Image: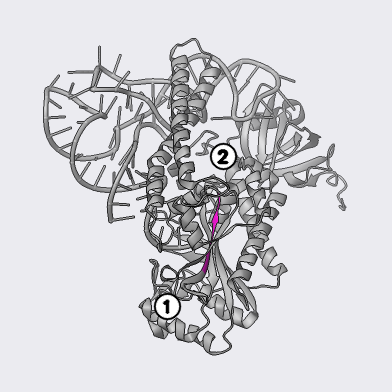
Amino acid sequence: MYSKFSTFSRIIKMNTKQLKGHIGQIVTLKGWVANRRESKTVVFINLRDGQGMCQCILGLEGLGEGLFQTAKTLGQESSISVTGKVVEDTRQFGGFELNATDLKVYQNAKDYPISNKEHGIEFLIDHRHLWIRSRRQWAIMRVRNCITYAIHNFFQGQDFVQMDAPIFTGNAAEGTTDLFETDYYGKPAYLTQSGQLYGEAMALAMGKIYTFGPTFRAEKSKTRRHLSEFWMIEPEMAFCDIFENMDTIESFLRSVVQEVLEKCPDELKILNRDTSNLETVAKKFPRLSYDEAVEILKGNQDVDGKNTLLTIEEDIKENAVRIIEIEEDIAQREAAIAAGGMKKGAINFNQNKIDTLKQELKQIEEDQRNMPQWLESARNFEYGNDFGGSDETVLTRLFDCPIMVYDWPHEIKAFYMKRNPDDQRFARGVDVLAPEGYGEIVGGGERETSEEWLVEKINEHKLPMDVFQWYLDLRRYGSVPHSGFGLGLERLVAWICKLDHVRETIPFPRYYGRLEP
RNA sequence: GCCUUCAUAGCUCAGCUGGUUAGAGCGGUUGACUGUUAAUCAAUAGGUCCCUGGUUCGAGUCCAGGUGAGGGCGCCA
C-alpha cells in the first residue's frame, strides 16, 4: 500500500491465489484466457495465471463500448491483464470472481490448437509445449513439484546430504541395460543409468546422502511405465542394514504421500484422485520374502481370504459384463439420435457421452486381451525368476498399500547386492510395489561389504575389473554395512495422481521414438 | 526383439456383407441471445479416406507390402 502516487495506490497487483481477503477491493490480475463465453452485454473469461483460475466478468457497463468490443474478440490463450473488483462467488473454482473495470491486451491469440474438447494422445504430445497449460496437466505438474519438495524435505530433515552424481560414465556399470552412447573427447561414454556406485562412495564420506538427478536408459520399451529419460532419487546410508533400509523407505514414502495429501487437495480433486487409496500409506507396509510373494502370485497362498488368480478371473468376468453394458448404452443413444426430433443440445450431450463410453470400451477391451496372458504368466511362474510387470500387477491386486518384497534369489540381482548371511541363496535386495497396478516404484537393498565376494561377483557377471577398482577401494578402506535404494520419480507421480501413463508426469517426456518437442 | 490393436475434415469419431454426390459432434466464420461454467440457437466454409501395388464393372471398405501410432511381453524405476 506504500506508494507516493496516490491515484495508483488503490489498485493492487496480485495472482488468483491471493484474492481471499481482498473482497470489495480493486485489483489487477495478469494471465491468459483459458475459456471465453459471451452474450449481448457481458463476456465471461476464465483467466488462468499459473497459480490458479478466476472468472472475470467483462460487462459493457464496467468497461465501456471500446474495451467491451475488444473483449468480445479475445481468442483462447490471449494474454491479458484485467483490473476490477473482487467479488465472492462460491460457485467458482477458487471461490471468487472479478468485476472488470479495465482491460489490457498483451496479445490477442487466434486459433489456439488445443480446444476444450477431448484430443488423442499423439496430438497432445505433439503439442506438449501448449498442453502443459491445460488444467489437468497444470495439476499434475504442481503435484510433481510438491513431491520433489517433500522428498528434499524428508531427507534434509534427517541430515542427509544431497549429492550430484556424474551423468557421463565410462562404463556400463551393471552391464545389463542398453545405454545411450556419446562421444567423450574421442572415447565412448555413456549417459548414467544410476548414480548408486558414486552414492556409496559419498555415503562413506558423508554418512547419509541422496542423489536427485536424471537417468537414461535406451530400452526400446513401449509401455505406460517407461521413459528413456527419467528422474531418480537414490539415498545411500552407511551403517544401515536391509531392515533399517526398509524402515527408511516406508517412512519416506509415507511422509511424501501425506505431504501431497495435505498441500495439494485442489490438484488431486482436479485429477479426480480417490484419496482414500493414498491414505492407506498410514498402514504398515506388508513385507514379504520372495518365497512368500511367489506363493501368493501362484495362488498357493491367500491374502485375507482372497486368492490372486481367482480375483483376476473375477475381474475378467466383470469386464465382460461391463463391455455388454457399454455396448447397449451406446446402441441406445445412437438409435435415439438417429430417430430424429432431438434438440441440438441433447444430441451434443449424447454424442459426448458416446465418445466417453467408446474410450472406456477401448480400454477395457485392451485389458481383456492382456489379462488372460497375465494369468497364464502367473500360473506358470518359475521359482527363481524375477517378477515381470504383469506379475507385479497380479501380486499387488490383493493389497491396497505399497508392499515390500525382499530376499531375492541372488542370481537375478545386481553384483553389488549383499548375500543373506543366514541363507546364501538369497541377496538382500528389496523392491517396493505400488498398489493399483503401478508396479515397482523403488528398488534397493543392502550392499556387499566383502572385497572378495565382490570380485567373485564381478567376474561372474563378466564385468571389466579395472573400472571397478575405485569401487573396490570402498571395501578396502573402512568398509561398513550400508544400504540404499532408488525411487523412480515419474512412477511415484503417476501412482499418486493415478495417471495411466508416466509420460504425463514430466514436462517434456523422452521415450522410445519421441524426441520432440 | 516378439505379440496385439489401429490410421477418414483443424480435433474426436461414424461409415454394416464392396455400390451414385463422403457423414456427425466439437472447433472456425457470420448472425441471434443479461450470468455463462466444454453456454445455447440458426446459417456457413472445411476431405490426396496414411503411402504403394493388387483383386473387381466398381475399393474409404477386400488382399499384399510399406510408413506412423496406441498397448502388452521382455528389460526396468
Quarter of the figure with residue A404: bottom right
Q: What stretch is highlighted in magenta?
A: A429-435
Chain at numbered mark 1:
A
Q: Position of residue A134 (x, y in %)?
A: 58, 42
Quarter of the figure with residue A218: bottom left
Instruction: Name the residue type under label 1.
Output: Gly
Q: Which residue is drawn at 85% across and 47% down?
A: A9
Q: Which mark is on residue A109? A: 2
Q: Residue at x 45, y 45 (%)?
A: A309
Task: Please name whichever residue, A229 or A272, is drawn nearer the observer in this view of the structure.
Answer: A272
Relative to residue B41, is residue A388 drawn left or right? Answer: left
Q: Which mark is on residue A170? A: 1
Instruction: Name the residue type under label 2.
Output: Ala
Relative to residue A193, is residue B59 drawn left or right? Answer: left
- Crowding at dot 1, Cα within 10 Å, few <14 / some 14-19 / many 20+, comes out as some
Task: Please name whichever residue, A338 or A420, is drawn nearer the observer in this view of the structure.
Answer: A420
Upstream in sequence: badge 1 or badge 2: 2
Task: Please name whichever residue, A349 or A113, is drawn nearer the observer in this view of the structure.
Answer: A349
Chain at numbered mark 2:
A
Count of number-bearing discs: 2
Magenta-drawn stretch, dominant element (helix, strand or loop): strand
- Crowding at dot 2, Cα within 10 Å, few <14 / some 14-19 / many 20+, comes out as some
Q: Rounded to the nearest whole Å, what is the CA distance between mark 1 and mark 2?
A: 49 Å
Q: Does the magenta stretch include residue A153?
A: no
Q: Which of marks 1 and 2 is in front?
A: 1
Q: Position of residue A440 (x, y in %)?
A: 51, 57
Quarter of the figure with residue A455: bottom left
Mark 1 and mark 2 in contact? Answer it, CB < 8 Å. no
Q: Which mark is on residue A54? A: none
Q: Which residue is drawn at 81% across and 44% down?
A: A11
> Is residue A441 something that shows in the picture?
yes
